[in-house]
Image (cartoon, rainbow, N blue to C red):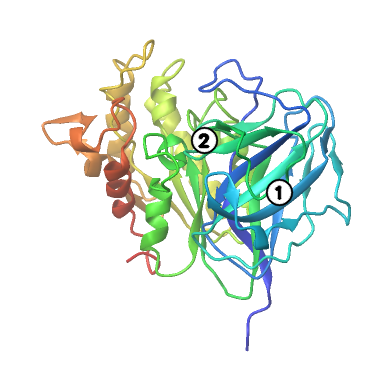
Amino acid sequence: MAATSRWIAGFRSALVDPAEQIRLVEPRGFADQTVRQVLHLAGGGEQLRIHLTNRYGPAPLTIGAAHIAVRKVGEEIVTETNVEVRFGGATEVIIPAGGDITSDAVELAVTAGTDLALSLYLPEETGLAPFAQIPSESAYVATGNHTAASSLPDAEEVTSRFYVTGIDVLTSTNTPLIVAFGDSWFEGVGSSHGANHRSVDVLNERLLEGWAVNQGISGNRLLTDEIGDHGLARFDRDVLGVPGVTHVLVNFGINDLILTGTAPAADLIAGFTALAQRTHAAGLPVYANTIGPFAGVIYPGLSTETGVPMRNEVNKWLRTTDVFDAVFDVALAVEDPSKPDYIRPDLDSGDGMHLNDAGARAMAETIDIPTLTR
């Protein structure tokens, strides 16, 4: 008997408040502009629906028009796939301040690995937009309503993502769905822009069935707010709130140890334990990565003197704990054998803190989820 069709996440993007004091990229707003964003699908289905947010907006947000299509190259789309997106049957919608909205079902069959182009027309002054700061993918901004245009030759190319938090796909398969929940080592900082070489993309190549969606936020901490709501605070929304989630994969710790203040090892261990307990209470298995090396970080103002020994202490606990269903030793896989607090030179993106494409692959190949990975 065929399984009943259901909506599950085919793409996710975790956004941050543009008003935060500490930012990696300058935020921006829009007025009388089309924003066309490239979204790389982890999974496919018979139809899709789109999630947009005005979560951090101080005023209502007007979406004047929206279209979605298969992306051809750059800002160009495959014209015959371009479909108008509606919200409660309407082509225009207002999202209240602090609110979220889900589109009507869109008749566009899609497959895993497809790049979609979502075009939003923002007719009124938006104020600063909630955004993913460094998603390793482009968006294109053009004046006026060009949501139905096949290309935007005069558009400005930008490297952040705005307003969109996810795409769900309708499928009749009982698909396992992993939520990769964490920081920049999931979001993809250091990997080649636009190439889909993030560690989560490589993990998807290795899965025997199902897929993983990416809920990484660059600079995100497990314990305290600084860049994005901290992991324990956003867990219900960004993990349990993802439709179809069956497994949880966690990568946190570097930012708790290297950004403002250094979390004591005992506090990080307590945070990881709470995260595991909350996941198990929801009936889901949860897996964690050890904390990667960062002693070679080159960014001014970041000190590793306290964080490095704390990392080693927490990793010692992670390697022996049974609070997770399994722990994958990413740190061991990417560290320099002669200087284990540093990333191996051939895996370093060049900043001493993030992985290049080869490093992201080494990270993903360390992850071995029972029955799902090759």
Residue lying at 71% horizontally and 49% vertically, measured from the top left: 51
Where, by quadrant of the figure, is residue 93 drawn?
Answer: top right
Badge 1 density bin: few <14, some 14–19, many ≥20, Cα 10 Å: some
Q: Nearer the viewer, residue 10 or 366?
A: 10
Q: Position of residue 323 (x, y in %)?
A: 42, 49
Residue lying at 54% horizontally and 69% vertically, measured from the top left: 175
Q: Nearer the viewer, residue 108 or 205?
A: 108
Q: Position of residue 344 (x, y in %)?
A: 20, 35
Asked whether the viewer can see residue 350, the reply is: yes
Query: In this rendering, would 314 be left or right of 63?
Result: left
Tell me the element at label 2: loop
Residue lying at 68% horizontally and 69% vertically, measured from the top left: 6
Q: Amino acid at mark 1?
A: His
Residue of label 1: 51
Considering only order in the chain, which callout, 1 or 2, is on the residue closer to the N terminus?
1
- Above or below, 181 against 266 in this view is below
- Picture disc at residue 217: 2
